Amino acid sequence: MAMNYSEAVMDHFTNPRNVGEIEDASGCGTVGNAVCGDIMRVYLDIDDDGIIQDAKFKTFGCGAAIATSSMATVLVKGKTVQEALEVTNKAVMEALDGLPPVKVHCSLLAEEAIHAALWDYAEKNGIKIEGLEKPVTDISEHDHDHDVEDEDEE
Ligand code: FES
């Protein structure tokens, strides 16, 4: 049952870039996916001009999550916070020459963790980043529509 991973995915999985933490990060975000149990944390170092100088990640995630986070951190470095919002999971997958369909959800972990880190940065600095929505901590909620029953009521 071989899956077709691109060379780029294998490269970023076996030799991930930007693994680690940033002390006193400008923004830090953690998200998980309750369905697969994987967790991702992203740290961003953002300068006074709003340019992302450094990005690092730590994950308790699968190979595809590692590869996509590696690529996502590579892509956001040197960008403004606004430009970083364009580093969507689709952009990351394109940069990696695709992912097998069952692994596409893994790429959301990177995107959402970056958004969470940007949100943290914005909150710390009392600014608003146009187009950035409040992140969720469990991205598997994104897979469903928001018709959650209220179970507290009897
Ligand atoms: Fe959970 Fe890939 S299986 S992130």
Image (cartoon, rainbow, N blue to C red):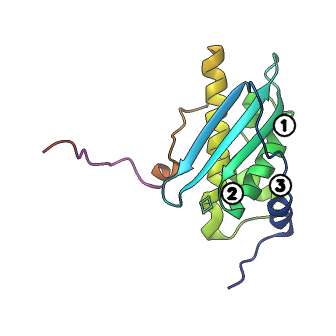
- Which residue is at a point 70% across and 62% down the rendered structure image? 64
Task: Indicate the quadrant containing the C terminus: top left, top right, bottom left or bottom right.
Answer: top left
Q: Residue furthest bottom?
A: 1
* Label 2 Cα neighbours within 10 Å, binned few <14 / some 14-19 / many ≥20: many
Q: Looking at the rendered structure, which numbered label has been put on residue 102?
A: none
In the picture, measured across the screen, residue 114 lies left or right of residue 8, that is: left
- Which residue is at a point 65% across and 57% down the rendered structure image? 61
On the image, the x and y values in percent for residue 51 come to 82, 26
Q: Are marks 2 and 3 in contact (CB under 8 Å)?
A: no
Give the quadrant of ligand 1.
Answer: bottom right
Does residue 128 appear in this view? no
Start-end of magenta stretch: 143-151
The residue that mark 2 highlights is 65
The residue type indicated by label 2 comes to: Ala
Does residue 21 appear in this view? yes
SS for callout 1? loop
SS for callout 3? loop
Q: Quarter-wise, where is residue 16 in the image? A: bottom right
Which mark is in front, 1 or 2?
A: 2
The residue that mark 1 highlights is 77
- Measured in 3D between alpha carbons, the distance from the residue under mark 2 to the one under mark 3, in whole angstroms, is 11 Å
The residue that mark 3 highlights is 16
On the image, the x and y values in percent for residue 99 come to 71, 66
On the image, the x and y values in percent for residue 44 come to 75, 32
Please tell me which of labels 1 and 2 falls first in the chain.
2
Task: Indicate the quadrant containing the N terminus: top left, top right, bottom left or bottom right.
Answer: bottom right
In the picture, measured across the screen, residue 14 lies left or right of residue 81, that is: right
- Determine whether 12 is above or below 102 in the image: above
SS for callout 2? helix
